[in-house]
Each structure stands twice: as structure tokens, then as C-alpha cells.
Amino acid sequence: MDSSSRWWDDFKLAESEAGHWCIGPFELWARRSPGAWIFARRSIEDEAAASVDVEIPAPSGDFPEGREGWEHSRFGFSRSRAEARLRPMLPDRSLVVKPEMPLVLPAGEDVTFYVGLPLWISFEQGPERTELWQAPLVRPSDTWFGSLTGQGELCYAARTRAIFDRKNLLPRPNRAVGQIHVRNRASGPLPMDGLKLPLQNMSLFICGDGLLWTETVTLQRDDEDEMAALRFSEGPPSDLKNPVLVSPPRTTPSKGILVRAFDGLLSIRGGIDGIRHHRSRGSGVIDP
């Protein structure tokens, strides 16, 4: 992804002007009137769509007002502000990542891999950047992570190839990239049927390669259970140049915590493949 694929930034619209954004599978229209901002947005079925097209201003007559298949919203003001901004964000819940091909980490081994992560979009008005709304660029599926009858957490779910070579990453404008380190210090193998990443505790950076990255996540399993020590780096992989913070964490993470990250042998299969009544419509595939 090069600089021409960057869809977020500050912009201005005069009264009665509109803006139009196509961000991979997500399409957005915004129109400003003297006392309101009016929006229309939709997601198309082609989740692999990777093109970006931004038109500011766009022909106001093309605004899809009242058309089926679009979600419409309107925000009223004593006087609308010309300054606005689109900002990418990470989701508001943890993400359960399930490799498409089973992955087992033998005792004493480490592994590093890369995963694609879903993005939300925030629309902010004025120099004070007041948020009007936020929405997923592609809505992930819901899943329950944990015991079916005990403690657990409502998460988003995604399948991934778990790329080991960074050169094989396929940039998508509706995804960020995360580098994951897993260390198995237990005496037995670690089947990684699923891995929970606390995206609400993570930041988003733009780097010199033009991609959006999160902090590097390290998970270390020391005992024969599903708990792991969780650690975030200070930013994206250290060899990436010129990282700039785009969005801070939604919730400040604790340091040196134990998390239930590998609760996958039973409950991930139940959550992603079996508990259909816990799942809402959305995308189940994120392929970096």
C-alpha cells in the first residue's frame, strides 16, 4: 500500500458539498449542510477488494439519499463545521484469531507470525475532533471465548493464514497488521486452535511502508494450561521506519498481566464453529 492508498486524514467541505470514499469493501458518502452532516455508508460482499478512491468534493447529486442497501444517518448542529477527519481505529473487543491450517508449537519453541486485523472508521468534526460515529469497515463475526457455562468474553472472530514471512503480506486498506510472538515454555506442545488478542488495549500506527501496524504482542505460556503472560512492545516491529501514532488504545492496558489466551482446545471450536446462536452476521475471514 503506497501513499495514494491512504484514505484517512483531515479535510474540509463547504456548505452543500459532499465527499465520497471507497475503502476496499466499504463505501462512504458525507454531505454538509448549514445545520447538519448527512451520511450514507455500506459494505459490499467482496471482502478482498483492495482499491482506494477518495473524491473531495464529490458531486452532491450523486449522494445515495434514500437508496436501499445504504445505512443513513444525520447529525444536527446550530452550525456545522467545515473541518472534519476520518480516522482508523481498532475494534472495541478482543479478536479470536483461528489459523486456517492447524498450528502446533512444540515445548520450548518460539514462533513469530503476522495476522491481518479488522479496522473501524471514526468520523470526527471540527478542530476539537468531536466524534459523530464509528463503524467497522468489514463487520467481523461474534464469538464466545471461554467456558460455555462459566466465565467467558464476547469477542470478534476471524480466520487467518498466519503469515510467517512478512514479504508475503497482502496489504488491504481495511486491515491493520499485527506481529505476534508466542513462546511455549511448558513441558508439552501448544495447539494454537485459536488465539485471543485484546485489540481494545492496542494502538494503531502508520509506518514508512505505508501500512497500519499495531504494537508487537508477546504471549508466553509457562504452565500446562491456557494462561499466558501478555506483553506489548512500545510500538510496531523495530525495523519499520518512521512509525506515527494514528489511534491510541481504547482502554489502557495493564502491564505484566496473565490472560486467558489459549483457551482454544474446546471453547474456540465451540465459539467459532459450533455456537451459531451466539454469532451475528459478519465476516469470519481476515487474510493478511
Image (cartoon, rainbow, N blue to C red):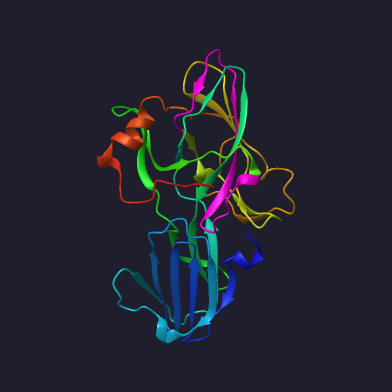
Q: Is 203 left, or right, of 72 in this rendering?
A: right
Residue range (magenta): 167-194
Residue 234: x percent and y percent?
A: 68, 42
Residue 229: x percent and y percent?
A: 57, 27
Residue plotted at (30% across, 77% down): 66
Quadrant of res 153: top left
- In the rendered image, the vertical position of residue 282 relative to residue 135, given as above or below: above
Residue 72 vs residue 130, the one in the foreground: 72
Q: Does the magenta stretch include residue 187?
A: yes
Q: Can residue 146 be seen in this view?
A: no
Residue plotted at (47% across, 30% down): 102
Which residue is outermost to the left?
Answer: 277
Residue plotted at (57% across, 51% down): 170
- In the rendered image, the vertical position of residue 111 relative to residue 34, given as above or below: above
Residue 137 vs residue 91, the one in the foreground: 137
Q: Is 278 left, or right, of 254 in this rendering?
A: left
Residue 38 vs residue 104, the one in the foreground: 104
Quadrant of res 133: bottom left
Residue 140 vs residue 14, the one in the foreground: 140
Residue 180: x percent and y percent?
A: 59, 36
Count numbered badges in the picture.
0
Q: Is 82 left, or right, of 2 in this rendering?
A: left
